[in-house]
Image (spheres, rainbow, N blue to C red):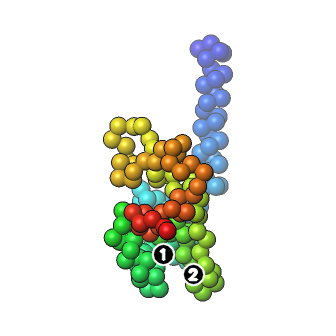
């Protein structure tokens, strides 16, 4: 073979060989297939306890109902029923023990994450009515008029 073919071939073989050698030093010995309970069956056995010790940040609606029963009932009967509390209020980790009040994003942009009017046919946002941002109370935040837990109700 000519050198213009052999040189790139040797470079490619060298790169693949370097990767295989680096893999021996970089991949932990306990990494591999250890059952089907993890993504694609590959994980580190020594990593299992790390994941068990990882603190869950999102608690779910069941956690909120213990103290905020009226708000959760209102939410369950409103169009916002599929939306989890923590989507707007943030993660409830350590609430109410260390964090007395959860931060609430009351901005118009937060509401438009779901309610932006998209001109796509059969959009996934068909469930959330799209708001024409240029026409609908443009200079006001949504919560100035609407009750977030039940947006069908208006503030007085």
Image label count = 2
Residue 45 x, y percent position in the rendering: 51, 69
Q: Dot 2: within a 10 Å radius of its alpha carbon, few (fewer than 14), some, or many (20 or more) residues?
A: some
Does 102 sit left or right of 45 as displayed?
right
To which residue does mark 1 refer? 59
Residue 40 x, y percent position in the rendering: 41, 56
Depth order, front residue of 82/97: 82
Q: Are marks 2 and 1 in contact (CB under 8 Å)?
A: yes
Q: Earlier in the sequence, mark 2 or mark 1?
A: 1
Q: Is residue 55 visible?
A: no
Q: Is residue 50 above or below residue 21?
A: below
To which residue does mark 2 refer? 95
Depth order, front residue of 113/94: 113
- Which residue of the protein is positioned furthest toward the top in this rendering? 2
Residue at 56%, 77% (x, y): give it: 93
Depth order, front residue of 27/61: 61
Residue at 60%, 38% (x, y): give it: 16
Does 99 sit left or right of 142 as displayed?
right
Distance CA(mark 2)–CA(mark 1) = 10 Å
Tell me which corner region of the image, top left, top right, bottom left or bottom right, holds residue 120: top left
């Amino acid at each position: 073979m000519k050198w213009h073919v052999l040189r790139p071939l040797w470079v490619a073989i060298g790169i693949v060989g370097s990767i295989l050698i680096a893999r021996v030093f970089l991949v932990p010995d306990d990494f591999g297939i250890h059952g089907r309970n993890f993504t694609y069956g590959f994980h580190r056995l020594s990593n299992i306890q790390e994941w068990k010790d990882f603190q869950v940040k999102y608690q779910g609606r069941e956690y909120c109902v213990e103290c905020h029963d009226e708000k959760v009932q209102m939410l369950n009967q409103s169009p916002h029923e599929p939306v989890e509390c923590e989507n707007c209020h943030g993660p409830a980790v350590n609430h109410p023990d260390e964090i007395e009040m959860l931060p609430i994003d009351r901005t118009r942009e937060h509401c438009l994450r779901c309610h932006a009017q998209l001109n796509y046919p059969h959009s996934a946002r068909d469930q959330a009515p799209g708001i024409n941002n240029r026409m609908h109370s443009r200079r006001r935040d949504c919560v100035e008029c609407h009750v977030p837990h039940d947006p069908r109700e208006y503030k007085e």
